[in-house]
Amino acid sequence: MDAMNCRGRRGRSPDSGAAIGMDDAVARGTPREPLRRRLLGASALLLAGGLVLPPRRAVAIEAGDPTPIWDRLRAALFKDRPIREDDGSLFRFDTPVRAEDAAVVPIGIEARFAQSAARAVRRITLIVDNNPAPVVGTFEFGPASGLAGIETRVRVEEYSHVRAIVELNDGALVSATRFVKASGGCSAPAGKDREQALANVGRIRLRVQQPPKLGEPNTAQLMVGHPNDSGMAMDQVTRMYASPWFVRTVAVDYAGQAVLRADISFAVSENPNFRFHFLPTGDGVLEARVEDTRDTVFNTRLTIRNAQVEAA
Amino acid sequence: MASLLASAGVALASGAGLPQTPRTRVLPAPQQISTQLRFELRVLAPGVYVHAGRQEESTRANLGDIANLALVVGTHCAAVIDSGGSYAVGRAFAEAVRRVTLLPVCALINTHAHPDHVFGNAAFADADAGLRIVGHARLPAALATRGPTYLHALQRELGAAAAGTRIVAPTETVDGTTSIDLGGRRLLLRTWPTAHTDCDLTVWDEASATLFTGDLLFVERMPALDGSLVGWLKVIDELRALHPRHVLPGHGAPDSPWPAALDEEAAYLHLLDREVRAAIAEGRGLREAIASVGVDAPAHWKLAEHYHKRNVTAAYAELEWAQ
């Protein structure tokens, strides 16, 4: 599964730090670097150019309205490849009707079929059209995934379409789309307690369902203590903007096989949180490796032996 | 009006010993700014005037007049506690202040960063460019990170009625306690660890033993958790030890029974705490918790449809790290 060859992520180009990392793993045999540059170029555009902080509309956008932002994103990320809207038979896509808390909006997508050689999900891209950085992240599923699915929490700034674009192993693109209303007037995408968020940096935790069941997809959760800053708030004293500081990549393996690879942005909420599946077929170590935009690496692991989670 | 404000400004400048710069100007009157708002101040205690905001979300109809606001008058100046949810509300409040007293406003105190409490600041600042605006040490950062979102949401909800509203940060901050002398009475300001928000501040008027809780106390309206559930419950325990003669909650009836009103709020927050912890312990995810926690609680509170799920979300994201 060539889509999983991206572990390590060494030799990152200098400009990638501020970009929304789109994965460089390859569809349809396109050479890695050119594609990577194209995608990073598109991402840089999202951050530095016209797609950042799109002019905000004073009037709520209703579902079904044309979305110029999506047209531009689609062209940048998927070129002219056809994207078929799922009728609900392939994926379950859960978003709230309203972003109750703008800082923590749970969204989840899960395949209605198990990963197999015949049919598998290669990657899922999550997009919130009207966020300052619309691409939440790209999630890839490896051989030890069992069942493709990701539940995470995102910041939602504005009334927006929320999309999941799924690439299947045959290269086909399938989308699921929902409309999410903005939260009320006293909710903000910023964190609630900056000091607590900073105190949390370095904490990382993996949990799995109890007891684990061998031979079937198990639910796992990865929690990362991190402010996941956009750097978009101005310091009132210095009048300077902070640098973006967010978790950039997530890699999860079980027994040496890839479960999940993710490239994410600061659209993911403070203390990034991911629920996904892994498929334990025997004893093994579930390990997570997370790297942020300061190149700091956070690791954690959990051992399963005789279908029991071993005490750390 | 302009002359009254001008004289008030001069009195402030000389009384407070602040720089003798031009302190006042005529209130701007952009055509869009509504002057239709009925703004009432009523007496809670001698020298203490309160305005009860509506138990609603901010709309074009109410112009963001949804938070409780207060005026305390001493012998040489007056203090305003929170300024309202839009420029229009702040202006109506400033005009109401002038109907009550001609003494200068020597301080505008913000109890926290939420828009319904601070978006009238600009109207007071426009009336007195040197106005002393006081808030929690973390208030400026909260306004910097959240202010643009709040302003955008207000413009979305109020449309043209939001005209003139802008973010005006405090001119000085408090970390711990401080007092403001109004002449014949002192206001004691106290900041709190993260609770309702990360920048909650209460005011105690010594002369009348009135406690202005800001949004540390919600009455009837569902409390909104935007700080720390654990922290808020601790702060409530400390507040319970106070014995005010009068109370102004951030929302809800002035002089609600004390500490019964506080206990009702605490009961809801304890319910959240208990049920969210149970959901996490059972491995229920956030989405499942939102669907299952405290489903009966909303019946007791106004605006629960806007706040309960949000509170569960915030509580979950916090408590998941506590276990």
Image: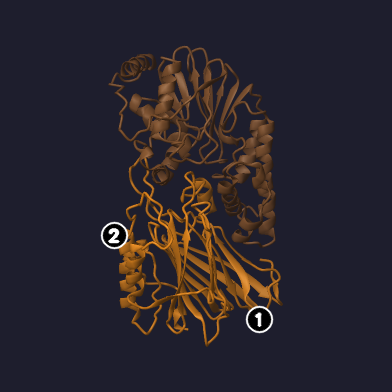
Q: Nearer the viewer, residue A125 or A159?
A: A159
Above or below A4: residue A62: above
**Residue A192 x %, y %:** 51, 47
Residue A32, image quadrant:
bottom left
Residue A237, image quadrant:
top left
Above or below A173: residue B115: above
The chain containing the residue under callout 2 comes to A
At label 1, which amino acid type do we have? Gly
Residue A215 got which mark? 1
Q: Is residue A266 visible?
A: no
Q: Circle 2 is placed at which residue position?
A: A49
Closer to the eye: label 2 or 1: 2
> What residue is shown at x 63% (from left), y 23% (from top)?
B244
Q: Which chain is brown?
A: B
- Specify whether B79 is left or right of B240: left
Q: CA distance from mark 2 to mark 1?
A: 47 Å
- Specify whether B35 is left or right of B81: left
**Residue A213 x %, y %:** 69, 76
- Which element is circle 1 on? loop
At label 2, which amino acid type do we have? Gly
Q: Which chain is orange?
A: A
